[in-house]
Image: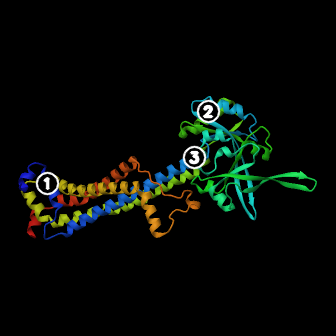
Amino acid sequence: MSDSRRAGRRPTELFIGLRYLRARSGNRFISFISVISMLGIALGVAVLIVVLSVMNGFERELRERILNMTAHATISGFDGPLADWERVRDFALGYDAVRAAAPYVEGQGLLLQRELLSGAALRGIEPRLEAEVAGLDTMMTEGSLDALEAGAWRIILGEALAEALEVTPGDRVVLVIPEGTVTPAGIMPRLRRFEVAGVFRAGMYEYDRSLALLHLDDARRLYRLGDGVSGVRLSMADVFTAGSEVRRIAVDYGGGVYIDDWSRRHANFFRSIQLTKTIMFVILLLVVAVAVFNIVSTLVMVVRDKRADIAILRTLGITPGQVNRVFMIQGTVIGLLGTGAGLTLGAVVATHLETIIGVLERVLDTRFLAPDVYFISDLPADVAVADLLQVGLVAFGLCLVSTLYPAWRAARTQPAEALRHE
């Protein structure tokens, strides 16, 4: 089918703009530059999608792992132990927003095993109730939470903490509490021998290296709390409303308690993630902008190469506005193809990123993420549709802007002056 018949089926500007994407046999350089522009846009967009997806995945994993180890919200004693914790727990469970509640005791201690020692954050729990509030029971690699029994003096350690002390289930450790006991010989530190009953792995070095679990009654005896506890941990139906809901519960209860929630306790983590995500978006968007504005140089060269064609088209009756649209269409197609390819490549790479990273780590015999630095040991990715739309629209918008100057120059071409030099 001839070009004239194909042109009759679509607008003249569209036909000519698509035609100019294919260079003549005597000038392949412009087509090469067009391909480079598309590849640059595609690569920049793909990198931006992968980075944003990794930040999304990091935030999701961090939130899930934190919520598996800590409560959505807590109600604790305002200036000491919470004595009437059973009443507080029953009161909180009366709200639809609260799914479960469990008492806890928190403290600090020093674990000793022969010549090895390590500080630890101690948490006294009621195993049955704790399993309803957090996901600790699903993180056990050895033993189970049920091994914690009142008066049995057993302890469960984080995986990295157990490795640091070189202990396994069945071994014994000595726990030293930073509270003294007055004796005729002076003030003596309070200590107790525990049997290691299990090991858990949270996947966050902060918890795996420092957290130790023991039974609630054993913790109360160690810290001499009597019937009191440090507070009550709450599991909420909606984690994102935990702060407002626990505040409402405390107000209805009559005050006199201290409240906290996961978003306040770990606010710095999530603020830093959002800040990093914003900074990376701006930096990588500049890389996309550099690739996008290659379209400017490409179209300027096309305009210079097609001056005679433009002059002939003008003499045949094509208006400056139509000439303008010809080159805008050409730049738009380059940008559309580059942006589409970049979004597709970025989504595919981000979806399979953990597999790719695993292969690279095995081939290079290295570890990209040190768990003691980045809190997690793998590189998750979460491809968000909103990010795809945002990046795609911004990149395509930059492509449209980059066509304005070359198209304006083409529209100002004077037929007589252009043909005089041919």
Looking at the rendered structure, the kind of residue marked 3 is Thr
Residue at 64%, 36% (x, y): give it. Answer: 101
Please state which of the two labelled residues, at mark 3 or mark 2, is closer to the viewer.
3
Asked whether the residues under the numbered discs 1 and 3 touch, taking CB atoms below 8 Å apart as contact, a structural biologist would say no
Q: Residue furthest right?
A: 184
Locate residue 169: give its quadrant: bottom right
Task: In the rendered structure, find residue 138 and report the number of the disc placed on it.
Answer: 3
Q: Secondary structure at mark 2?
A: helix
Picture coordinates of residue 33, whole percent (x, y): 24, 67
Q: Quadrant of the C terminus?
A: bottom left
Looking at the rendered structure, the kind of residue marked 1 is Phe
Q: CA distance from mark 3 to mark 2?
A: 31 Å
Q: Secondary structure at mark 1?
A: helix
**62 up-or-down from 255: above or below:** below
> Which of 382 and 342 lies nearest the eye of the viewer?
382
Task: In the rendered structure, find residue 219 and report the number of the disc placed on it.
Answer: none
Residue at 13%, 69% (x, y): give it. Answer: 25
Asked whether the residues under the numbered discs 3 and 2 touch, taking CB atoms below 8 Å apart as contact, a structural biologist would say no
Task: In the rendered structure, find residue 15 and report the number of the disc placed on it.
Answer: 1
Q: CA distance from mark 2 to mark 1?
A: 65 Å
Please state which of the two labelled residues, at mark 1 or mark 3, is closer to the viewer.
3
Residue at 34%, 61% (x, y): give it. Answer: 43
> Which of 19 and 323 lies nearest the eye of the viewer?
19
For label 3, the crowd category at 10 Å Cα-Cα, with few meaning under 14, some 14 to 19 and many 20 or more, is some
Q: Quadrant of the N terminus?
A: bottom left
Q: CA distance from mark 1 to mark 3?
A: 62 Å
Provide the residue designation for mark 2: 248
Residue 153 showing in the rendered view: yes
Q: Secondary structure at mark 3?
A: helix
Residue at 53%, 58% (x, y): give it. Answer: 377
